[in-house]
Amino acid sequence: MSDALVIDVAGLTKSYGGRRVVDNFDLQVPRGAIYGFLGPNGSGKTTTIRMVCGLLKPESGAGSVLGLDVIADSLRIKERVGYMTQKFSLYEDLSIRENLEFIARLYGLDRRVARVDQALIDLGLAERQAQLAGKLSGGWKQRLALAACMIHEPELLLLDEPTAGVDPKARRDFWDQIRRYSAQGVTTLVSTHYMDEAVQCDSIAYIAYGKKLLDAPTAEIPKKIGLACWRIAGRPLQQAQKLLEAAPGVELVARFGAEIHVCGHDGAAIERAAIQVKREQPHVEIERIEAGFEEIFIYLMAESRDNFQ
């Protein structure tokens, strides 16, 4: 493993009930990076994260995490990783401070009082430290969970759908903190369904039904996918949508409120389709646009085959 890589794994495979949920998965994540992990529900993201942090043993594959063997050194990996699960998993009948003190004792940390004090300050929890965890809103539970993940000062942070169910401001505050950790050299692998979060990542790996379909720096992904897109706006749009879905060369028709985005790899064909809609429905407006992550995400999902089938 290169000293610059915190995660360097290849061929990770895991099956449940005869169904392969992670299939020959490779991933390389450099130190200090914020790495986005995208994919539909049931695509194997959580299983992959658990193999990376030592909670699950892969059936095959190898590699290293933080310079440690992903199979032989799983216990040592767990000590140096912070893992935030989808579901809030701290004690709801304990206060914020009591939860953090308990986690600090579990790790056998020195300077426990000072570490807890600092965690409370870092995540803006100091004024609420006596509040019971069960009485917190989703955003404050999220902050507490992140504080618990970071109290032992891990080098790698694994976040599994960390902002699901929290309000937009809480999500922004959360990402501000992740960027601060990144500036301190903490590497982050984060799974998310939010496209506005995905674009904040340095790189993105896209997994669908156990297989990795894409792995590239975020800025390079639109060019790598190469979709040509047009926007059709106006009301009504039902007839326009039918015309586009039947047009040659169209690979994606996605509705966005009072707009339709039509995309495909044949730019000339997509342009002809948009112009034909304008001829038959003069009330609509057409405009060429750049493919965004929402369109790319929908396109990749449509191209994926469900491993339940």
Image: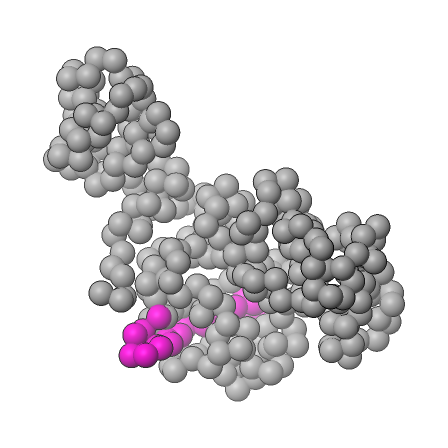
For this orientation, the residue located farthest to the top is: 282
User: How are the residues colored?
Assistant: one colour
Q: Where residue 248 sits in the image (x, y, percent)? A: 12, 35
Q: Give the total number of marks visible in the rendering.
A: 0
Horizontal side, residue 54 vs residue 252: left or right: right
User: 224 or 149: nearer the eye?
Assistant: 149
**Highlighted range, magenta:** 1-21
Which residue lies at the image location 50% right of the left edge and 41% below the top edge?
196
Which residue lies at the image location 62% right of the left edge and 70% below the top edge?
81
Is residue 17 located in the magenta-colored stretch of the structure?
A: yes
Q: Give the position of the C terminus as an image quadrant.
A: bottom left
Residue 76 in the image: above or below residue 236: below
Which residue lies at the image location 67% right of the left edge and 67% below the top edge?
90
Q: Where residue 54 sits in the image (x, y, percent)? A: 54, 77
Q: Where residue 165 sits in the image (x, y, percent)? A: 55, 49
Which quadrant of the figure has residue 251?
A: top left
Q: Where residue 203 sits in the image (x, y, percent)? A: 48, 52
User: 276 or 141: nearer the eye?
Assistant: 141
